[in-house]
Amino acid sequence: MDFELLHRLTTAFGPSGYEAAVRELIRKEVAPLVDEVEVTPLGTLIAHKKGSGPRLLLAAHMDEIGVIVSYVEDKGFLRFAPLGGIFPLYAIAQRVRFANGVEGVVAVERRKDESKPPALSEMYIDIGAPSREASPIRVGEPAVFVGETVRVGERIIGKTMDDRIGCYLLIDFLRRLRTSRFDLYVAFTSQEETTLSGARTAAFGIEPDMAVAVDVTLTGDTPKALPMAVELGKGPAIKVKDRGMVAHPRVRDAMVEAAEREGLPYQMEILTFGTTDAAAMQLARAGVPSGCLSIPCRHVHSPGEMVDVNDVERAVALLLALVA
Ligand code: CO
Ligand code: ZN
């Protein structure tokens, strides 16, 4: 694994709707590997590797969850709205960073009833500003959570495995790609965590014959987890369904066959909440047969998202087998 690349990807600033820094980093990596690189009006980066076969669209999202300032109080404390699915319990006491480098901490008001977890509306960001007038941050500025990416044995822990691990995986896929039976489009999408609009519009423009999202999924292998037949380190998961889609059987089966052919371990995924870019891509134009290849990930949408290196490498091998 190219941990140096993964580290750069996972620590770049890219809250949903503000992916420019991640996009430039990815553009430099993929431009030498493909025939054309294009950025859509909504900020999705599309790398095109020309071929004579049917059009296949692979997609991973560049954006990460974050917060956006909704109000600045007289004393300089910042109220915020979520950019994507923020769990209040995970937000408490986290450090956040704005685009201009200013950092703050998420704190909780004193509450009458402390038996229940606080809502985001009961929290504020303290950047140490003395007043609204003197605040270096204004309404409308987005921030991301702060967190290092570390490798612990076969596992990687970081704040943006969702879905920079997918971006990493597709870059690695392009680096290793030799032959493809497809006219191949690899999209690094914007705004998945908020609206899926980057993938939706990219799919409309490309008009693919088939689409596969690469994203993280939850696992059932932690204490008192929801019963779910996905574990870390047991291979990539081939999605059957989630809250936003039923994977097209042809796409799902093509991935299963590719894994079987290569002797790669894989798991079947049924996710009872959440969805991915695949849900939006399948709705482009008259409909696109779509599926999703998932990287099992613990503690999704926390600053400690954890994946297994072997799952990532097997997912790359599976995609290479799928297009061969
Ligand atoms: Co997510
Ligand atoms: Zn994701």
Image: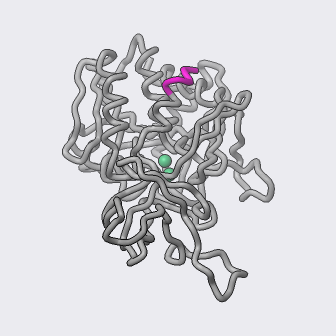
Q: Residue furthest top?
A: 178
The answer to whether 54 appears left or right of 147 in the picture is left
Q: Is residue 220 magenta?
A: no
Is the N terminus in the top left, top right, bottom left or bottom right quadrant? top right
Residues 108 and 117: in front is: 108
Residue 274: tell me if it is visible.
Answer: yes
Question: What percent of the width, then of the height, locates residue 127?
Answer: 47, 61
Question: What percent of the width, then of the height, locates residue 251?
Answer: 46, 37
Task: Please report the residue visible at 69 percent of the width from the left and 44 percent of the height from the top.
Answer: 230
Task: Please report the residue visible at 56 percent of the width from the left and 60 percent of the height from the top.
Answer: 273
Question: What percent of the width, then of the height, locates residue 145?
Answer: 51, 52
Secondary structure mostly seen in magenta is: helix
The answer to whether 93 appears left or right of 99 in the picture is right
Q: Is residue 3 magenta?
A: yes
Residues 236 and 93: in front is: 93
Q: Residue furthest bottom?
A: 112
Is the C terminus in the top left, top right, bottom left or bottom right quadrant? top left
Give the tally of numbered discs. Answer: 0
Task: Please report the residue visible at 31 percent of the width from the left and 29 percent of the height from the top.
Answer: 185
What's the coloring here? one colour
Question: What percent of the width, then of the height, locates residue 76?
Answer: 41, 71
Among the 4 quarters of the image, the one containing residue 318: top right
Residue 275: tell me if it is visible.
Answer: no
Task: Read off the magenta span.
Answer: 1-5
Task: Please report the residue visible at 35 percent of the width from the left and 72 percent of the height from the top.
Answer: 132
Above or below residue 255? Residue 142 is below
Above or below residue 165? Residue 130 is below
